[in-house]
Image (cartoon, grey):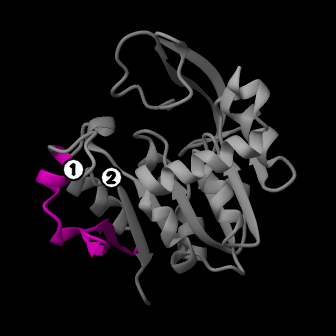
Amino acid sequence: MRHSLVPADIQLRWRVWQSLRHGEPELALLPELVDPQRVAIDVGANAGVWSWSLLRATREVHAFEPNPKMYSRLEAALGGKVHLHTVALSDTTGEAEFIVPKTRRGYSNQHGSLSRLGTNGEHGIVRVKTCRLDDMDIRNVGFMKVDVEGFECAVLAGATETLRRERPVLVVELEERHTGRPIADLITEVESYGYAGSAWFNGRLTPWRDIDLKTFHTEAVETPRYVFNFVFRPLKD
């Protein structure tokens, strides 16, 4: 009922406000992280919180969301304002099974992924098109946010040429629980593309090695102190 009565753009603004206050403080860093003259890419756009915020920080946004239900909401809220893509970014181009968890209220809008790791209980499967970001040949990329529930490293593997050519700032969600891999291994894999990683901690961006990730990641899942978004800046040549 709420979705039918409240305009999509108003719903999205409410979500942005909630995320800033209770979810992802990194959104407030966008003026610092985003070059307003370059293109931003939102991988795993979901409801569009990051896409909406990026529109206020830069001139052009590409949003990728393969979940048909969430894509329709994106289109209602941001159609004509951002470049919307229904494909799932990956390290291969073709088709794949997109896993959507099921809750007591039906299929979830959240946590859909190409990764089967962490899939527990009942879930649905949607066949989706996949594509490497490199095959999209998007130019002048200055920023990328990647949040695809454990499939982040595959997305970056399909974007190696883009990362080498464009050197964008990255914000990547990395979680042990979605990958089965130690968080330090995930971070160093992203850094291997020529980046230095940090995270928002104690009110500032902090080098990840200065954070006790056992305490604030591994043991802090779903608590207010949980660190899961990592900012990667390109190293200077």
In the depicted structure, whether residue 139 falls above or below residue 63: below
Instruction: Please report the residue visible at 43 percent of the width from the left and 76 percent of the height from the top.
Output: 233
Left or right: 207, with 77 as reference point:
left
Q: Earlier in the sequence, mark 1 or mark 2?
A: 1
Q: In the rendered image, which quarter contains the C terminus?
A: bottom left
Magenta stretch holds residue 50: no
At label 1, counting other C-alpha atoms closer than 10 Å, the crowd grade (few under 14, some 14-19, many 20 or more) is many
Q: What element carries label 2?
A: loop
In the depicted structure, whether residue 192 falls above or below residue 110: below
Residue 206: x %, y % from top left = 27, 74
In the depicted structure, whether residue 4 falls above or below residue 225: above
Quadrant of the rendered image containing residue 127: top right
In the depicted structure, whether residue 136 falls above or below residue 97: below
User: Could you tell me if residue 43 is visible in this image?
Assistant: no
Magenta range? 194-218
Residue 217, disc: 1
Magenta stretch holds residue 199: yes
Q: Nearer the viewer, residue 45 or 165?
A: 45
Label total for image:
2
Kind of residue indicated by mark 2: Phe
Q: Which residue lies furthest to the right in this view?
A: 80
Instruction: Please report the residue visible at 19 percent of the width from the left and 45 percent of the height from the top.
Output: 220
Instruction: Please report the residue visible at 25 percent of the width from the left and 43 percent of the height from the top.
Output: 223
At label 2, counting other C-alpha atoms closer than 10 Å, the crowd grade (few under 14, some 14-19, many 20 or more) is many
The answer to whether marks 1 and 2 mark residues whose Cβ atoms lie closer than 8 Å is yes
Marks 1 and 2 sit apart, C-alpha to C-alpha, by: 7 Å
Mark 2 = which residue? Answer: 228
Quadrant of the rendered image containing residue 47: top right
Q: What element carries label 1?
A: helix
